[in-house]
Amino acid sequence: MIFEKSILSELRSVAGMTFACLLTIVITMALVRTLGNAASGQLEAQLVVPLIGFSTISSISTIVTLTAFLSVFMVLSRQCRDNEMVIWLSSGKKLTSFIPVIWKFSWPLIIATMITSLIATPWARNQADELRQQSLSERNLTEIAPGTFSEFSGGKKIIFIEQTDKESSDLGLVFISVNEDEDETIVMGSRGKLVFDSNQLPWIHLEFGSRTDIKSFSNSTSKIRSTKFENYKMKIDTTPKSTTYKERVRSTSTWNLFKRQSSSDLGELSFRIGTVLLCLFLPFLSIPLANLNTNQGRLLHIFGAILMFIAFNNLLGIIQALIARQQMNLYFGLFCLPLSILIITLCLFYVKMYLQGNLMKMLFKKIRIT
């Protein structure tokens, strides 16, 4: 009972400090990156704080996983360095006796990683993408140069405005040409105004103008129909061209990934589930890893553990890429990750037991000689 309580209390206190340090580092990096984009004009100033928050939320799963691994590693390393581990082992405890204690410490972190990786992270990425897209759409619309033709919707819509008053949304005389296959629609308004609906989608509101529909036929003939209007509204589609399919997959909810199950969806799904598996198995790897005696110092010992975490995290990325390229099955990839951790853990357990057995034999020989 004393064994379990003492280790659990130290693990939780170290985990709190480790999580706070890692969270501070992530927030600082997000702040520097976001402020750099805002200073270069790529982002609006009012989006800095929300994007920092969403970026931090999307990194929580990795932070919790690294916290679980480093907390167990640092606590057990400290006990080995202060010879507390020798007291536990000499009192009848074994290295395997730490497994139930580590499990009691890890299962809340595993649940937190599952929630953040499968639910919170895609939601935060989706919200950040929507903010960036909305900001780019508003900037593209409000910065239309007067007297020039601007393209929207991949060149299908061409808009010309007479003047732009930056103090208001009045556009003056507006000319719009919409091309769909072989048909063309030309809309002209003597006055135009930029408005946004409840979903923050941009519309152009025209007054006192005309609409001309030109319908072409296969026999090189066309039909022209012209109508006049007093009020006319047209939606402007301004989806950024830089939005790639990979970014949309990273922002897709886990449930939609399960339903679609394309190669890219399965790759992203493997990364999210693999993050949970890392949080499940890596703390147990710390038990034999922390008990390996090193003479390089405490900081180098921790640095080696961080490098091992980076290696497994990169292995998770490699598995994701192989699944996305249809070179590996999802279930086989998810099986390889815990299997590799389990093999390394068992090998380290064997090495530690072997070294501990040789040390005991040497002590018994010295006792017999004396």
Image (cartoon, rainbow, N blue to C red):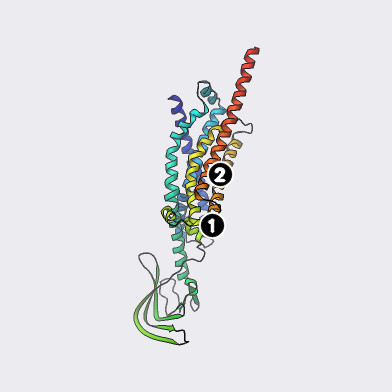
Pair 2/1: label in front: 2
Three-letter code for the amino acid on which mark 2 is drawn: Phe
Query: Which quadrant: the C terminus?
Result: top right
**Residue in view at x 48 percent, y 38 percent:** 17
* Point 54% across, 39% down: residue: 341
Query: Which residue is rendered at x = 47% and y = 72% of the image?
Result: 152
In the rendered image, the residue lying farthest to the left is 230
Which residue appears farthest toward the right when viewing the image? 369
Q: CA distance from mark 2 to mark 1?
A: 30 Å
361 sits to left or right of 30? right
Residue 343 seen in render = yes
Residue on which disc 1 sits:
36
Note whether residue 23 is visible. Answer: no
Could you tell me which secondary element the residue under label 1 belongs to? helix
Relative to 4, does residue 272 appear above or below in the rendering?
Answer: below
Would you say 314 lies left or right of 259 here? right
**Place of residue 133 in the rendered image (x, y in percent of width and height, measured from the top left):** 46, 63
Residue 172, percent from left and from top: 42, 78
Q: Residue 4 occupies which quadrant of the picture?
A: top left
Per the rendering, the mark at residue 185 is: none
Residue under label 2: 312
Q: Residue at x 42, y 25 (%)?
A: 1
Is the C-beta separation of discs 2 and 1 under 8 Å?
no
Which amino acid type is marked by label 1? Gly
Quick check: 344 above or below 127?
A: above
Residue 131 image position (x, y, % from top left): 44, 60
Secondary element at image label 2: helix
- Residue 282 is situated, as x and y percent measured from the top left of the image, at 52, 39
Viewer-side residue, 258 vs 249: 258
Q: Residues within 10 Å of mark 1 (few under 14, many from 20)?
A: some
Q: Earlier in the sequence, mark 2 or mark 1?
A: 1
Q: Residues within 10 Å of mark 2 (few under 14, many from 20)?
A: some
